[in-house]
Image (cartoon, grey):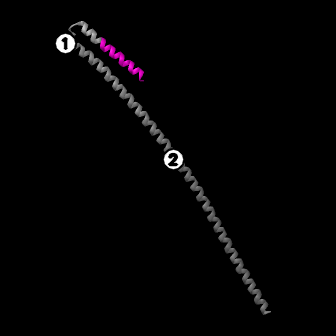
Amino acid sequence: MKNVDKKDERDQSNEQKDKKYEDIDEKYEDIDEKYKDIDEKYEDIDEKYEDINENYEDIDEKFEDIVEQNNDDNNLKTNDVYHDIIEDKEDNECCNNKIEISKDPLNENQSNINNKMNILINNEIIDNEKKTRYK
């Protein structure tokens, strides 16, 4: 009987140990599941950051486009101002030529004045024709 009792005790002890190890296994499985959940959360966070990064890249591209457009607009405005200055200069040259004609000593004769004025007028007409052709 003693042998049977000892064997029963060992069996019970082994069962208790088995149960203890099963409980420990369950705890580790629970911990493993928690870590998997945490991993999933971090993956979601990573995806959100990737989306945010893409949004910032889009914003950066839009900003570059706006800057480029502004530069183009500024260049056009500069060109317009440059052309206005050239036109003013040409107008001033024309006025200066008229003044020079009036100061010329050969202008004592009215026909000389008329001839010079006709030359200036013709030059101005030619210049205007060139401008309209090349616009």
Identify residue type, mark 1. Answer: Pro
Mark seen at residue 54: none
Residue 124 lies in quadrant:
top left
Residue 116: % across, % down: 27, 12
Which segment is the magenta one? 118-135
Relative height, residue 132 to residue 65 (above, below): above
Please give the residue where the numbered disc 2 appears in the rendered image. 57
Report if residue 49 lies within the magenta region.
no
Please give the residue where the numbered disc 1 appears in the rendered image. 105
Relative height, residue 108 to residue 51 (above, below): above
Question: Depth check: 38 or 96 in front?
Answer: 96
Image quarter (top left, top right, bottom left or bottom right) of the N terminus: bottom right
Residue 44: % across, % down: 60, 56
Q: Which residue is the extreme one toward the right? A: 1
- Main secondary structure type of the part rendered in magenta: helix
Residue visible at 66% across and 68% down in the picture:
30
Image mark count? 2
Report if residue 121 lies within the magenta region.
yes
Q: Which residue is the extreme one toward the top? A: 110
Residue visible at 30% across and 15% down in the picture:
120
Q: Is residue 83 left or right of residue 68?
A: left
Instruction: Looking at the image, tell me whether mark 2 or mark 1 is earlier in sequence order.
Output: 2
Q: Residues within 10 Å of mark 1 (few under 14, many from 20)?
A: few
Between disc 2 and disc 1, the foreground one is 1
Residue 27: % across, % down: 66, 71
